Structures are given as structure tokens and as C-alpha cells.
Image (cartoon, grey):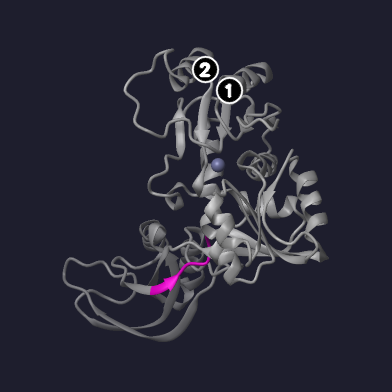
Amino acid sequence: MTLRDIQQILEEWAPTEIAWKQDNVGLQVGDPTARIRRILVALDVTLETIAEARRKGANLLISHHPLLFKPIYSITPATDIGRCVNALSKHGINVYSTHTNLDFIRDGTSFALAAALGLRNVEFLRMSYQIQKKIVTFVPSDHVEQVADAMAQAGAGRIGNYDNCSFRIEGTGTFHGNPKSNPTVGKRGKLEYAPEVRLEMVASEWQTNNIIQAMKQAHPYEEVAYDLYPTENQSNEYGMGVVGSLERAVELKSFLASVKRALGSRSLRCTGNLKKKVRRVAACGGSGSDLTEEAIRQDADVFVTADVKYHTFHYAAAKIALVDAGHYETEYPVVRSVVAKLKRELRKMGRQIPVYATKTSTNPILYV
Ligand SMILES: [Zn+2]
């Protein structure tokens, strides 16, 4: 199995197109044709995680944080990145990063954090703005399923927890083929009236081209008639942060103790009344403090995230219990999600490629 095959599994799950524009996700170092023997998943690429990959015989290191982010002008042992790239090349280890695209998917970084915190009925805290289009095509009745299936496979018709969503209405299509035409139905040079179905499906803008291509391939007509409409709908397929609830209300103090246990946090920074009962919990793995206002707006009792600034604590103090549980600690649960996802997909494909979660802590923060 090649790196390209693994990449395909990961990108069907967390498409690179949904990542932040400033992000740099995808293959960082390596060769897509390389045969992958074993895989190590970590939050960061460091000399220590590279050494762990070597020890485990892994020639693919999947990281959450991209190794290459800012422009670099030389690869030499003078910089951390240079030392890592040199070590990776020397030992034939490939690096693939899945970052904000993994944050924005339904079972991504914040969903993994929610699972670790034992939240129920988890939903996105804020939907990410993905422009939606409406694709409408006209298909002879006996080919509707085939065309709708192909469009759905390419990503059309996804609305929240539902897929294959479409609307269909029967009507009559007319066409008149010129002498060069080769009509599937009727004869060239003759005005035809054909029973057709108007098939409508929604699509995220970034998937539109693929969907149209799939639609044309599955469609029986020589010339496929379709309309592509802009909509003002926001897709609810991707989002930032999550909100859910605990099985029962508990005092903030005991909730904080359970957060520490669940995430292995040595210490937490927080605001709020320790005696107050909390039940509705918002969470965002990594630097999510920009979502504090949204968590308040959605009546969360507590918001667990990381990299919270002093003034944000001030802003939140009287409105919500705001908890900084550490960047590394709030993101680590997604390492286990990536491992589980890959194992599941590889098993389905009958492939026996071992996948490991890193045992090396790459948390640069010491609690003393
Ligand atoms: Zn992060």
C-alpha cells in the first residue's frame, strides 16, 4: 500500500480543501509512491517523534501540526526544521499533516476532546462558512438512481447527519439534435419530447467540479443539461468547536477534576464559581478562545479550550466558566481518533499495516 493510498483515506475523511487558507496541510516530506510499512501518529514532528518512528519501523509519520508552515530558505542542521527534514530524508520517513481540516470535521479534534470529556449529544459550536451550491440536472427516469448515486458519491446531497439528499420532480424535456448530434433518445433532426426527472442536490462549493464530472459520467445523454445555482446557505457539514452535555449536572470543581483526569493535565487555568453546577459544556481542542463568545451565546456553563489570554478570562469571568486545559492536552485525543480511523479503514481493505499512537510527549510546556 502506497503513501498515496493512505493519503486518500485521510483526505476522504478530512478533505484538505476545508483547511484554513493560511494552513499548510497534506504531504510535507516524502514520496507518494512509497510503500508504507508502519504508521506513527503524533501531534508534532520533532527529532524525538522521528526517533520513535524509526524504533517502531514506521516510514510514515502523520502529524497534526504541519512540519512546514512558514517559508523556509534552507534545509541545514542550523534549524529545528532543517534537522528534522534531514533526519526524515536520511531514514526514509514520510510526513503527512492533517491540521485545521481535521479540526473542522464532525469526528475531528474537538469531537475527540468531547468524547474524552464524556459529553453527550455533541454538535458543532460554530458552523464553518462553506458556501453551498445547488446542482440541478435533468435525467431520463430510468437513469435517475445511477446519476444521483454518482453525485452523492462525489459529495452532493449532504445535509447534517444525512446523505443522499435530493429532490426529484417528473417533467418533460425537449431537444432537437443537429446533423452532428448522436442522441441517446430519439433521432437527430427531429424535435423530441422525453420524460425526464429534474434532480436537485446541494453541494459544497469546493466539491462542485468533482460532482459535475461524476454527474456527466453517469448521465446517459451526449450533452448533459444542468444548472449550477449559488445559494446563501451555509453548509453544516464542517465547523469549529463543539457543545454537548454531561450525563448529569456536577459542581464545577468536580468537573475540573474529571477534565484533569481525562486529559492528563497537570494543572488547569480557569475562571468561574467552583461550587456552581455545570452540565452544558462547550469545548475546542487547541487555541479555541475566539469561540468564547459563541459558547456564552449558546448557554454553555463551561468552555474547555487552550491558549486563553488574561483579558479573555476577564471577559468571560461573570458569564461562563472558562477553562484552559493546555494545547497539547486538549488536542492529544485526536491522535487516538486518527489511529482508530486508519485501523478501521485498513481492516476494511484487508490490509495489515500497523498504526501506532505516539508515546513521546511533544508538549513543550513544563508545569513546575
Ligand atoms: Zn494545535
Q: Which residue is mark 2?
A: 92
Point out residue 320 in the picture as x, y percentages from the top left corner: 65, 64
User: Which residue is at the front of the view, 55 or 193?
Assistant: 55
Between the residue at mark 2 and the residue at mark 1, the CA separation in whole angstroms equals 6 Å
Q: Quadrant of residue 178?
A: bottom left
Q: Is residue 359 above or below residue 87?
A: below
Answer whether labels 2 and 1 touch (C-beta < 8 Å): yes
Residue 321 x %, y %: 68, 60
Work out which quarter of the rendered image holds the N terminus and state it.
top right
Q: Which residue is mark 1?
A: 59
Q: Quadrant of residue 244?
A: bottom right
Q: Which residues are magenta?
A: 232-239
Measuring 37% from the left and 74% from the top, which residue is drawn there?
A: 231
Residue 334 shown in magenta: no
The image position of residue 218, as x and y in percent, is 42, 62
Above or below for 157 versus 111: below
Along the viewing direction, whichever of 313 and 298 lies nearer the viewer: 313
Count the numbered circles shown: 2
The residue shown at (73%, 53%) is 115
Is 237 displayed left or right of 272 in the figure? left
- SS for callout 1: loop
Secondary structure of the residue carrying tag 2 is loop
What residue type is disc 1 on? Answer: Asn
